[in-house]
Image (tube, helix red, strand yellow):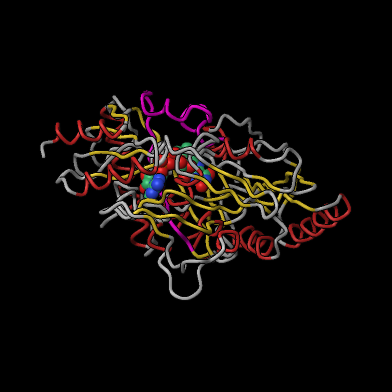
Amino acid sequence: MTETELLERLASLGCELSRPPGSTVTGGVPPDWVVQPGSVEQLAAAVRLLAGSPVPWRVDALGRNWGYDDSRVRLPGLMVRLARLKRFSVDAELGLATVQPGVSFAEVAAALEPGGPWLLPAPGSGPHTSLLGNALERGLLAGLGERERHCRDFLVMDRVDGSLRRLGWAEGIDAGARKALPYPPGPHRQGELFQAGGYGPIVVELTHTLAVRPGRRAFLALLAGDEPTEQLLACWRVAVREELMANSFLQPAQRRRLQAIATAHEGLTLKFSVTARSDRLLRAKIAEIQDLARSHGQRLVVNKGDAPDDMAVIDARADRPEDVGVGATGVEWRTAGLPFVPAVVIAFWHEVVSDPELAELPWTLRPLDQRALVWTAPLVYRKEEGDSRRALERKADRLERIRRAFGLPEHRTGAVRSTG
Ligand SMILES: Cc1cc2nc3c(=O)[nH]c(=O)nc-3n(C[C@H](O)[C@H](O)[C@H](O)COP(=O)(O)OP(=O)(O)OC[C@H]3O[C@@H](n4cnc5c(N)ncnc54)[C@H](O)[C@@H]3O)c2cc1C
């Protein structure tokens, strides 16, 4: 079958074909075509056709993972985009959202009862990105740890014959019980669904646990000096371990400036929120944090609650992430997973900022839980300027070298970079 015949047959199934939008990553190649099936049945038929052809292909959801992999493929071929699969439902009793790949954070959030018990905060990439895509690429649900931990039930399609299965679940298990339980009993293979870069099993439906809406919330910050210290990191670690803080992250002033956040403090800022059921409990928690901060020599202040709008880093709007693909500014994200050990974090940070190329890098450090952190650095560049692209490559190389020297894994790899 020639590529033209393949495309004709995909179109005759009802798939929409288009040329790919722009990309911001420098690795990989643009796909020749983006293929969008309109239903699970069309997807299954398309998968059978593709499996019988020599054309390489991968899947994505809404394709808004700018800077990690977005619309790139490793070899020339096709992108099967599942943006038209838009069904979802919410279980308001248990706080579960069951979504197809094309469903965004905004769509699920809009369906939740206003003021009700459940909440779906959007990631830094904005509300119009895919809940399922974010979960599979091991997204961070700020403050609650890895989104992977919020994944329950999966409906998965075989990449060869298009058949559907639920990994590890025996026939006849009640759907409600299946969605509510964290994983099937006995050995199961759900891990293989994560960070497969769209080259692994195709997830056509995911049940995701919603966050609990806090009754009261206060936004606070610790204002630190120019360098992360043992005291600051030890204080942060205790607060995370004792669940005093939610949604905490440490950033330098240059990162806030890139996000267009007015900043009077020139040192590092550890921002976080404190949540509680009542004002009384909230005050007690804040008093506890105040004591903890004082005993570690840290300064606690009230923060006006500016949300981290990561799209602002690239001068883009959170509700129009697709503009990044065609804009003049590109971004690449580099990550590292670190143990939450103050000495390791400080040594890693020191190595990065003492490199002249990386001294001004706008990084963010976030806890995954009380034992692990993730370090992310967006590398921003001008797509059409050779000097800017070369500077990007130099920075990426240096970061890579430091990460390897510390024996740290990348936290997220992206479809273009991950191996296999
Ligand atoms: C500026 C910016 C800030 C970000 N900040 C955060 C943050 O604060 N927290 C956070 O968690 N994430 C963050 N991210 C990453 C985030 O995970 C994604 O950008 C986005 O939420 C995923 O939605 P998407 O539409 O881009 O998904 P897609 O690009 O469509 O999918 C992402 C990947 O998931 C896989 N995938 C998607 N659908 C399927 C499927 N059906 N079957 C198998 N594999 C599939 C593919 O590998 C695909 O490449 C950020 C990204 C950017 C660009």
Q: Please tell me whether residue 230 is drawn above or below residue 101 in the rendered image.
A: below
Give the left or right position of residue 222, taking residue 170 as reference.
right
Q: Nearer the viewer, residue 13 or 75?
A: 13
Name the residue rendered at 38%, 35% in the picture: 38
Q: Please tell me whether residue 111 is drawn above or below residue 173 in the rendered image.
A: above
How many numbered marks are there? 0
- Considering every residue shown, the one lying at the far left of the view is 2
Name the residue rendered at 47%, 44% in the picture: 100
Give the left or right position of residue 229, taking residue 405 as reference.
right
Q: Nearer the viewer, residue 318 or 92?
A: 92
Question: Which quarter of the rendered picture does the N terminus lie within?
Answer: top left
- Considering every residue shown, the one lying at the far front of the view is 172
Ligand 1: give its quadrant. Answer: top left
Question: Which quarter of the rendered picture does the C terminus lie within?
Answer: bottom left
Name the residue rendered at 64%, 57% in the picture: 232
Name the residue rendered at 22%, 44% in the picture: 49
- Which stretch did the figure color magenta? 309-338
- In the image, residue 5 lies at what x, y percent? 14, 33
- In the image, residue 342 lies at what x, y percent? 55, 64
Q: Quadrant location of residue 361?
A: top left
Q: Is residue 265 visible?
A: yes
- In the image, residue 147 lies at what x, y percent? 53, 54
Q: Quadrant location of residue 121?
A: top right
Q: Is residue 379 visible?
A: no
- Considering every residue shown, the one lying at the far bottom of the view is 186
Q: Is residue 214 magenta?
A: no
- In the image, residue 87 lies at what x, y percent? 51, 40
Q: Nearer the viewer, residue 28 or 375?
A: 28
Q: Please tell me whether residue 236 is drawn above or below residue 127 in the rendered image.
A: below
Q: Is residue 313 magenta?
A: yes
